[in-house]
């Protein structure tokens, strides 16, 4: 680490700047490791990921989770349904509610996408020494908490 970077990281604002830059670069690199034959956008893959984690949810819940307006999410979901990645069904408790869930095709596509990017990251982690990997094991939950806390 250069002296300038070390001194910048000593303040909270410097740490914030470094962390933002590192996370953005890593996210960009992970996106570039996607299978070029996968026709889905990053936003569509993100929707599949939310559905995998949450199970059946409404369009409004999905839009809120992804921080987009419902009309925008409607377009994304309509394309995913039309291509067989997501299924819709009426709620058993309230016929007016439409629930969304992953189809088998959506689940397989999402898992293949994750597997490819995880493999790239695992290869990169193997280049680190054991102490660096241990440090990342400690930091990973903190990054997740930062990403999911309001």
Image (spheres, grey):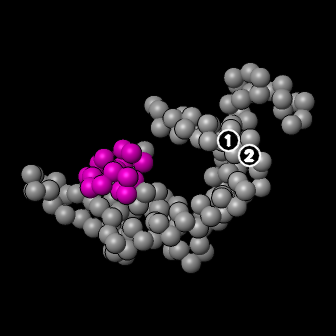
Coordinates of residue 78 in the picture (x, y in percent) = 33, 67
> Can the viewer see residue 47 in this picture?
no
Q: Nearer the viewer, residue 124 or 51?
A: 124
| Image coords of residue 140 (percent x, y) | 59, 41
- Residue 141 lies in magenta, yes or no? no
In the picture, measured across the screen, residue 97 lies left or right of residue 101, that is: left
Residue 45, position as x, y percentages in the image:
47, 62
Q: Is residue 57 magenta?
A: yes
**Which residue is depicted at the point 47% across and 32% down?**
149
Left or right, 120 with reference to 72: right
Residue lying at 74% horizontally and 41% vertically, measured from the top left = 131
Neighbour class for label 1 at 10 Å: few (<14), some, many (≥20)? few
Relative vertical location of residue 12 with respect to residue 73 in this rendering, above or below: above
Q: Quadrant of residue 76?
A: bottom left
Residue at the limit of the structure toward the top, as seen here: 11
Contact? badges 1 and 2 (CB < 8 Å): yes
Q: Is residue 93 left or right of residue 134?
A: left
Q: CA distance from mark 1 to mark 2?
A: 6 Å
Q: Residue at x 70, y 54 (%)?
A: 125
Q: Quadrant of residue 36?
A: bottom right
Q: Main secondary structure of the magenta part?
A: helix
Q: Residue furthest bottom?
A: 37
Residue under pointer 2: 130
> 120 or 100, which is in the foreground?
120
Magenta span covers which residues?
A: 50-66
Q: Which residue is label 1 attached to? A: 134
Towards the viewer: 61 or 132: 132
Q: Quadrant of the C terminus?
A: top left
Q: Quadrant of the N terminus?
A: top right
User: At 20% from the left edge and 57% from the top edge, which residue is drawn?
Assistant: 98
């Amino acid at each position: 680490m250069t002296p300038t970077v070390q001194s910048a990281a000593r303040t909270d604002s410097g740490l914030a700047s470094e962390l933002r830059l590192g996370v953005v670069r890593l996210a960009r690199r992970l996106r570039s490791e996607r299978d070029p034959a996968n026709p889905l956008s990053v936003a569509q893959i993100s929707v599949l990921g939310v559905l995998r984690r949450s199970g059946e949810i409404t369009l409004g819940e999905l839009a809120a989770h992804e921080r987009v307006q419902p009309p925008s999410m409607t377009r994304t979901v309509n394309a995913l349904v039309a291509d067989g990645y997501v299924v819709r069904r009426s709620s058993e408790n309230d016929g007016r509610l439409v629930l969304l869930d992953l189809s088998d095709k959506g689940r397989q596509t999402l898992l293949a996408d994750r597997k490819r990017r995880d493999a790239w990251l695992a290869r990169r982690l193997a280049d680190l020494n054991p102490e660096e990997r241990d440090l990342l094991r400690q930091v990973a939950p903190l990054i997740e908490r930062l990403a999911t806390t309001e």
